[in-house]
Amino acid sequence: MAEWEAIKPKNKALGWFEERLPVLALVHNVVGPGTPTPRNLNYWWNFGSLAGLMLVVQIISGIVLAMHYTPDTALAFDSVERIMRDVNYGWLIRYMHANGASFFFIAVYIHILRGLYYGSYKAPREVLWMLGLVIFLLMMATAFMGYVLPWGQMSFWGATVITNLFSAIPVVGDSIVTLLWGGFSVDNPTLKRFFSLHFLLPFVIFGVVILHIWAKKVSDSGNPLGIDVKSNADQIPFHPYYTIKDAFGAGVFFLIFAYFLFYMPNAMGHPDNYIPAEPLVTPDSIVPEWYFLPFYAILRSITFDIGIPFTDVIFVPAKLLGVIAMFASILLLFFLPWLDTSKVRSAQFRPTYRYFFWFLVIDMVVLTIVGGKKPEGIWPILGLVGTAYYFAHFLIIMPLLGKIEKTLPLPESIAQAVTAKAAK
Amino acid sequence: MSTIKDTIDGEETTRRDFLHIAAAGGAAVGAALAVWPFIDQMNPAADTLALSTVEVDISQIDVGEGVVVKWRGKPIFIRHRTKVEIAEANAVAMSELIDKQTDSERITEGHADWLIVTGICTHLGCVPLGSKSGDDRGDYGGWFCPCHGSHYDTSGRIRKGPAPKNLAVPEYTFLNDTVIKIG
């Protein structure tokens, strides 16, 4: 862990306060001039701070929306329409919140893929990685419940399908679903509790983000070369170097965000959610938001039971197996630090892993496409192959590859690699 | 004084140890008891449970047609089956069924032309198509769930697709030949 420097402000009043609660030292040592950071971070390292910024955007716009929204099945849809039509700048704030969720996920997905490529999950950063996954799971729960609130057709049926996942649990499944609903179907009690939890969870996420940054402070930032910092020559202060780089990245990111916000605010939404919820009519196809599609594809791809062949004995029915596969696809990532047996962190020095990383990215894109299609024709089998490959990547390829791959020689130090590159 | 020394050493079990464990145990039980109301409040409230029964007049439903009524927030399918549909439901070999039930287990005796099932796909809770004329009734002439492609037959039994169980049969009684009471 990097040294912790005390701050002694010249201003007497500030000094008096700092002695009693060292907040300036906290900023100084975590994102300030007193935070030595590897000098070779590339632009893929911007997405952590971008995700943090999107969390702030979501919390601010969400608090404002809560001032105008009514969590009641009879009023929810209309209150959202009122926000869109009557509340001053309501359309802007709601579109910001809806598209903000998508951009939050874009930033987080790139941030996770960055970690996968550069081996950011490896010792000593395992806990840092796991805290990130906790944030990801909390985000998924929050986004799901938020999507239910406008009480459109997709809200209602999305909520119905996802809560029904828990009915797959043997013995207690149905009781759990009734408990989640507070009734015998998704209805008013469900909407009200989802609103309450959708308000709460972002602050829980904020708390875990603090732990995530704390863990980063303890184990230091990783870097594209994946080698440890050896001397001061390998590092530069976080402020001003990375604060300015993050700020520039935020400018570009927000520009793209603004383009969606102002020119195509419904591009990532589903038109059916502008139809009020109707419990007796299921839409033609129920499609989750794009950021859930790969996991939805994994869920749907399992249509076979596990049992003794040619008999009626079934150990794990298809429905339960699909649910297990979907949750396992994320929980698996918690074990990645041990599934990956390679001593080398960065894919820059792992010529074979580099290919498999991109195969995994392609696999995720395929699953995303499959998740958005009706389960007919080629799509179910493609989903099954994609699911099988996803699990094979983490359970077979990663453990084996670390043992057999011939990695490239690592540079002596970050400073040496950076100056050698500059000399060329 | 010797008692305190013993406790610090941890050599002997003392009355004080007992008090510590009893107090901690009591606190744990108390905390568990306090948690229960906060879990149980999520379960259906009294007014939700009190949702009464529904009576449906079925005299207007022609042979071959179906209706959907709402009971406890869920759709209930009522179908007036044709002779052919009943025959089809009875002709299926048990070995072909995923969730093995005969047609007679799923209807009221003497009212074989009426099939009454909960209109919720046993996969993930969508409402299957097939109650309205013109709907896709699937490969087995019953219902078809558009969400994940489950096919149900004319007895509401699952025949193909990811759903594990037959469409549930709700509690209902024939008050007379033209009125049924659900619930």
Image (tube, coloured by chain):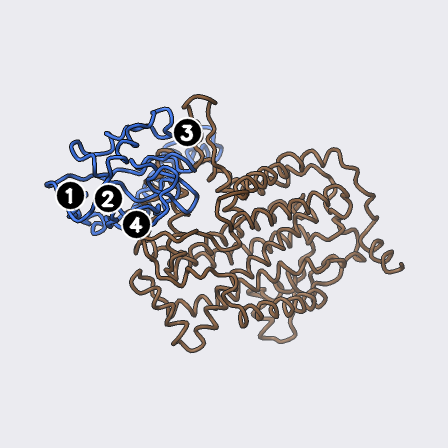
Chain colours: A brown, B blue
Q: Position of residue A288 (x, y in %)?
A: 47, 53
Q: Which amino acid is tagged 2?
A: Ile
Q: Answer with mark 4 or mark 2, whichever residue precedes in sequence.
A: 2
Residue A285 appears in the figure: yes
- How many angstroms separate mark 3 from mark 1 (CA)? 70 Å
Q: Answer with mark 1 or mark 2, whichever residue precedes in sequence.
A: 2
Q: Which amino acid is tagged 4?
A: Lys
Q: Is residue A259 left or right of residue B137?
A: right
| Nearest to the observer: residue B177 or residue B51 | B177
Secondary element at tag 4: loop
Q: Answer with mark 1 or mark 4, whichever residue precedes in sequence.
A: 4
Residue B139 quadrant: top left
- How many angstroms separate mark 4 from mark 2 (CA)? 11 Å
Q: Is residue A160 left or right of residue A202?
A: left
- Assess disc 1: are there few (<14), some (14-19) or many (≥20) residues with their C-alpha within 10 Å of its C-alpha: some
**Mark 1 vs 2: CB contact within 8 A:** yes
- Residue identifier under label 1: B180
**Image mark for residue B78:** 2
Q: Which amino acid is tagged 1?
A: Ile
- Residue identifier under label 4: B132
**Mark 4 vs 2: CB contact within 8 A:** no
Secondary element at tag 1: strand
